[in-house]
Image (cartoon, rainbow, N blue to C red):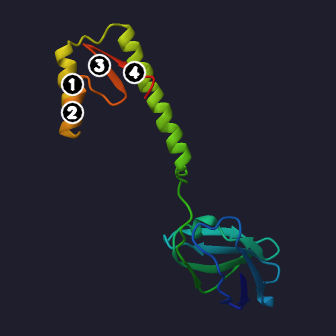
Amino acid sequence: MKIKVVNQRLYLEPPETAEGTREYLKAEFSFSEEWDGMTKMAFFRGADGENHPKLLEDDTCTVPAEALTAPGRVGVSVSGTLDETIITTDIKSFSVPATLSGGTPSDPEPTVWQQILDKVDETQQIAQSVREDAEAGKFAATAEMVERAVSTYMTGLSPEMHRNTFRGEMPGRINYGRTTHSNPRR
């Protein structure tokens, strides 16, 4: 950003910047002869209304990040001192538009493959927990309780399939009284 200072007036070329910029935007000043030999300080007033001074070195400074934290107008002025003499300038401003940067990055969304792997892992953990509970004897169900649970589950199946299941007539199985065996020939 180029800023020309003639007597006590600033003339600036507005920079192309955005909120949240840090350690990037440089302000380069050129002064008229009244400023020769002076110690020069630039002041940047952010959109929040706070002033942020910067001592000029070789008539240059980096615009303070604090002045660029919020979108809005940023004001600039300069003062110079030499012994008892103080020179100040008027204020010029430039616009700092909003940006979408900043904040804390979110974790990336898991891929479909990662979601599948997570579900497999979760299923394995559940299966292991059920296995441990069964081995510890935590399941005590009567045949009637199992039949009721299966019946409730099967209510969504066709009536014929439901009826055949409780008769032991499953496709691919041969019924030998109460014991049902797989038919290897089918």
Dot 1: within a 10 Å radius of its alpha carbon, few (fewer than 14), some, or many (20 or more) residues?
few
Extreme-front residue of the structure: 185
Residue picked out by circle 2: 162
- Asked whether the residues under the numbered discs 2 and 4 touch, taking CB atoms below 8 Å apart as contact, a structural biologist would say no
**In-front residue for pair 47/183:** 183
- The span from disc 1 to disc 2 (Cα, nearest Å) is 7 Å
In the picture, measured across the screen, residue 11 lies left or right of residue 109, that is right
Report which residue position mark 3 lands on.
175
Front position in the image: 143 or 132: 143
Q: Residues within 10 Å of mark 3 (few under 14, many from 20)?
A: some
Q: Residue at x 21, y 24 (%)?
A: 166
Sequence-wise first label, 3 or 1: 1
Amino acid, disc 3: Asn
- The answer to whether the residues at label 1 and label 2 have Cβ atoms under 8 Å apart is yes
Give how far across and how far down residue 184 sits, in percent. 45, 22
Residue 178 falls left or right of residue 32? left
Question: Which numbered disc, 4 or 1, marks the residue closer to the eye?
Answer: 4
